Image (cartoon, coloured by chain):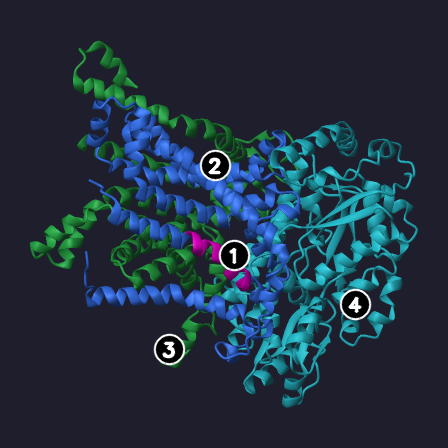
Chain colours: A cyan, B green, C blue
Amino acid sequence: MRNTTIRGARTGRTARRRTLALTSVTLAGALALTACGSDGSDDGATDEDGEAPPTSQEGTVTVWRYFSDDNQVRLMDEYAEMFEAANDGVTVDNVFVPYDQLNANLVSAAGAQTGPDVVVFNGAEVATLALGGALAPIDEYWAEFADADQFPDSVIHEVNGETFAVQGYVNLLGLWYNADILDEIGLEPPTTLDELEDAMAAAAEAGYEGITLSALPQSQGEWQAYPWLSAEGFSYTDPDPETLEAGLARVRAWVDNGWLSQEAVTWDQTVPFQQFASGDVAFAENGNWQLGTAASDADFEYGVVPLPLGDAGQVYLGGEGQGIGAFSENPDLAWQYLAGTYLDAEGQVLPVEIVGSIPSRMDTAQDEAVTGNDLLSPFADSIAMYGANYPDGVIPPEAVADVQLTVGQAWSAALGGQQSPEAAATATVAALESLLE
Amino acid sequence: MTAPLTATRAPVTPRARSGRQRQVRLVFLLPAAVFMGLFSIYPLIQLVRMSVSAVTVGTLNQEWVFTGLDNFSRSFSGEGAPALTRTLVFVVVVTGLGMLLGLAAAITLRTRGRWSGFLLALMVFVWALPPVVNGSVWKFLLADSGLFNTVLLASGLRDSPVPFLYDQHWALMSVAFVNAFAVIPFNALVFRAALMNIPPETFEAAALDGASRWQEIRHIMLPSVRSSTLVLLVLTIVYGFRSFDFIYVMTYGGPGTATNTLPFLGYMQAFVRYDFGLGAATSVAAVLGVLVLAAVYARSIRREESES
Amino acid sequence: MKQTAGPVLTAWKALLTVMYGLPILWIVLTSFKSSGDVFSTSSALIFSPTTEAYRDVLTADLLKPLSQSVLIATGTTVLVLLIAIPAAYGLARTRGHLTSIGLALLIVLQMMPQTATVIPLFQVFGSWTLLDSTVGVILADTALLAPFATLLLRPFFRSVPPELEEAGSIDGASLMRTFVSIVVPVARNGIFTVGTLVFLLAWGEFLYAVNFFLSPGEYPLSVLLAQQVSAFGINWPGLMALAVVTSIPILIVFTSTYRLLRDGLTVGAVK
């Protein structure tokens, strides 16, 4: 229903939008990028029949992304080159929009019946974009995609029964350790929570910090809290104040013991890793995307093991989702772009080499680039041991942002001493019950 | 509105004529009225409409369902009430520090010379930096390993770092201080412009009478900044009531919710939780609070006018 | 007018200099660090300086954003002053309910969270084909800053002695001519100050720029600055180097208007 209205609207508006772009050219005397391309393709007709589109070989694919990190930018530039080389006359235009503005910008653009062809966004926020009408469903393309069976369910993002995005790679948290410090205190990398706590105690004894992590009161905090909370048995399927309290209390005790700085409540995920890389900290709960930082900034021996979470523990499988804009003038070309880069078996090797991300395709995950890398293989092992959908499928799409914020704030309140773990757990579970209905 | 009416009935006295002449000057408001009618009123109406409707990311681009005061009661039964208290504390600190130190800085900067010129440029330079830069710098300076704690620890004044940004009470004071820091250059610049309108002869006369510096400040400078003080006071309070970028950069409202003020809460409700209706209600409530202030402002303006 | 500052004043001045000098010093130091040195406590002051961040920032790609920033800030300042000067004068010289309502409305507009105006303005600009154009951003910035400028300017017009104007009108000059040739010159201190402030604010404004420009080639400097802050953390040396580089035009504008202000005072016969 919703689907057809959007598409019907698009056909009628294409012409108007072109004049719109042209006027603004004369008005501002500036380049209007939206005006170029798309002339050769007649998207309206092909869409509505649902037939295989004639391959249009010219046009522009506009990609919105929030990356500004050098390596991430390089990855997208290489994808653009790759696609342009394979398709004569096609240009790929990577557009930066700051992370904080991306979602709001896409939704307001959708309100004005415009937007990019491809969106690369935080996979966890797919619900916001899908509900906001900024993404087009890709079910038809996905159904005909020959390699679809190579992708595990956890990287395919559905909202209310429609598929809106597939992730080309996966990012997740592991336990980074400073091998020099472990040598000094004579311990092996931990495999259980008790071993981890013993090691932190010994490291603190020797004059080091125990661990760094992020306790920012928002979704990043929730992403970092979830492994420790789930290790105590907490889950969104049946949120229980006691397990939540146990998780919060365990990590709060690290603060009380002096293993973790209370300052963590002001840290995003970058600052704690830079602290780790400066050499005075035994452990860091951080992600595979820090490979480059570790290589350039850490002048000590380091390694990675899966987070020691026991049987119940879970680690979110994060990463960017790639979807097609709801007002793309050439969705077929946009899909070709995705299929030829992010979802392609060879294309998926690039993020491994450039950024250190784990491929989402099962075949590429067995590639030498992953299995032969001592730092990446622990992350790949973590996927098998603890991998969990991010966000959890039991959270209703419209409540995802609320749930992440609520738990992130509880995490921060408990670690920062604004509330006791017990009070934070009770209040959070009460709030979760209405959100998860 | 009543002035022209009385003017037509009463015999034309010079006073009434000047009154009519005065009202003629309403013409000068026309460009502003047209411009704001085009670009400011519609967003204002939309904000108010949003605050009484159920608007989420899914319904933003569709018809909005009217829900009455539901958003307001939801906001203020939850985080809104404690946020209001924090906002008041925050605004009092920002306004107090911002006004007093702004005026003090202006008095210092009024004198000529290289140092004053340099300091003024420095302050305006810092003021003009984007909040993300200023906020990040202060986040570093106030960190455990930051300059302030390093000095405090090294001097033996404290044996553990001051938890500037991660203790719930310290954090609110720290962000308020940094906001005041950011607003002082602005207030100083405007105060200074008012001080510069004082004719030099006034100071010369005062010097001849043997006035001390304090007397100069009290009897010459303070009266001359009076009309600027009022508008600066309003602007500083408004600034305190709408500022969220420093909180965003320095604490993100934490630890927990300890620095969640109304503007930050409104931002989060609208752009993190994508409950636009709820966020709009919080913003509208803040605007209403400031409207009371605006009424006070308008009244004191009237009084000021009847004196002149 | 030469005055010697007392010890209290000198101490206070020194404190202010440290308070505002420290952040700048820190910004400049960081801009010469490598990212590894930013967090290391041992290299807070002593580190091997690198100009890497500046080399990354100072490229030919900077020219287009620079010209965009100049265009936006200048356009906004002119437009704001064109609107706010007469409005402030009108509000300073009239009385009654209309004036009070006008003032209250200005405060309410000043209170509007900028984030809340983005979405409705996007709709307006979309239907008026102003999206993705510099004109649109200038109009939005003007709407943002005009209430602020009007409120600030009003006291300056109130302090213009009405007798000056009456003298003008006795000479037979029209209201408009009196305003332009007598009132505005007397209030120029305020106008310069407010103009400078508006310019600086428009220079740094980024929320509208990032939302209303749909093509990245049109972004002004302020958006480049925001680009250093990503979801994956902040490129500290890059951010600080860019902050230094983008602030240089600010410094030029400010020091030149400052000289104008100072000279204006000595030359100006206010009375």
The amino acid at mark 3 is: Arg
* x then y, percent, for residue B61: 64, 34
Looking at the image, residue B23 lies above or below residue C132: above
Which residue position holds label 3? B158
Measure the alpha-carbon separation of dots 3 and 2.
Answer: 49 Å
Label 2 with label 1: CB-CB less than 8 Å: no
Q: In which quarter of the image is the C terminus of chain C?
A: top left
Q: Quadrant of the N terminus of chain C?
A: bottom left
The amino acid at mark 1 is: Thr
* x then y, percent, for residue B300: 25, 36
Query: Which image quarter: residue B212?
Result: bottom left
Subunit that carries the residue with mark 2: C
Which residue position holds label 2? C143
Measure the alpha-carbon separation of dots 4 and 3.
Answer: 48 Å
Looking at the image, residue A347 lies above or below residue A296: above
Task: Residue at 23%, 64% (x, y): give it.
Answer: C9
Q: Main secondary structure of the magenta part?
A: helix
Looking at the image, residue C32 lies above or below residue A87: below
Left or right, residue A369 beside residue B194? right
Which residue position holds label 4? A353
Left or right, residue C77 beside residue B7? right
Which residue position holds label 1? C246
* Residue B178 is inside the magenta segment: no
The amino acid at mark 4 is: Glu
Looking at the image, residue B214 lies above or below residue A384: above
